[in-house]
Amino acid sequence: MDDREFCEAMQAIGHGDRSFSLLRRDAARRPLAASEQIADQLAEEIAREIIPPRGALREQALAERFGVSRGPIRDALRLLERDGLVQHSPNRGAVVTDYSIVEMRHIADISWPMTRLHLGLIYKRVSDESFQAMLDAQRRVGQHLLRDEPVAFALALAAMSQKQARFVIGRPGELILQLLYRPSIRYTIAGLKFDGASKAAHDAWQAYIMATESRNSDEAARVVLTMLRDIHLPILEKEAEAQF
């Protein structure tokens, strides 16, 4: 991804983003296949916990629901498995992935150096025009918090992080950020439903924008990852308690 492409990507982020296809390479630039549309719908239902953790996804029932053969359903489930949202159980078939509090903490531990790395590099390499486009995108993403739109916020944040990583590290960097941020989307959406969570997250997001404006990559990474930890923790602790 060159500087022009990065600028275009930033200009596209934050405009009411709702589709998980935004997190796939170039998917927003072409019509989506039936399997992708089905995967997007199921991904949002998983993220919003309409389909709960460890919930089964039966091919025949889904084929009847969406009015298609089992082929597109099978392809959609493969997409969800690749995204880390679904896994195959020997006895139950496709089930919604359920990350433990330990696994999510490990993901957070890995996220810190990756986020710090790509933010540190991007502030040094990006043109003034692209830097401004990134700031504008951050402001649009923050508006989702004010409007109480957790799905749009979580997806736009993940898309922004992936595009930043791709600009400075390349396709491998984008793939790594996909693996790290996909699991957190559901917990971000659920966590923002807690009383006052959106307001606290918005205040943290403003601090993130200020750190970006000063090109302070250490502070930007610290603020955004602390914000996500604070959003996720009540959900993870609640789920940990339910397991005992």
Image: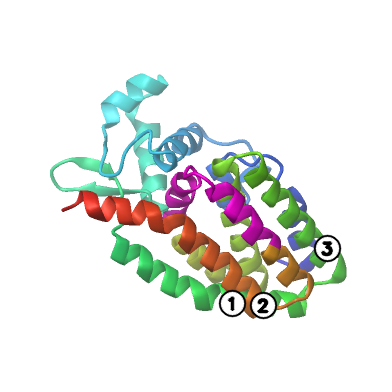
Residue at 52% x, 78% y: name it.
113
Q: Mark 1 points at which residue?
A: 116
Image quadrant holding the N terminus, namely: bottom right
- Measure the alpha-carbon separation of dots 1 and 2: 6 Å
- Looking at the picture, how far across and down is residue 167, in whole percent? 67, 69
Q: Which of marks 3 and 1 is nearer the N terminus?
A: 1
Q: Nearer the viewer, mark 3 or mark 2?
A: 2
| Disc 1 + disc 2, Cβ < 8 Å | yes
Residue 84 seen: no
Residue at 28% x, 31% y: name it.
59
Residue at 57% x, 48% y: name it.
198
| Disc 3 + disc 2, Cβ < 8 Å | no
Q: Which of marks 3 and 2 is nearer the N terminus?
A: 3
- Measure the alpha-carbon separation of dots 3 and 2: 16 Å
Query: 10 Å neighbourhood of mark 2: few (<14), some, or many (≥20)?
Result: many
Give the extent of the magenta segment.
Answer: 182-206
Magenta span contains residue 211:
no
Q: Mark 3 points at which residue?
A: 132
Label 2 sits on a secondary structure element that is: helix
Q: Which of 141 and 173 is in front in this view?
A: 141
Q: Earlier in the sequence, mark 1 or mark 2?
A: 1
Please name the amino acid that badge 3 sits on: Gln
Please name the amino acid that badge 1 sits on: Arg
Label 3 sits on a secondary structure element that is: helix
Q: Name the residue under label 2.
A: 217
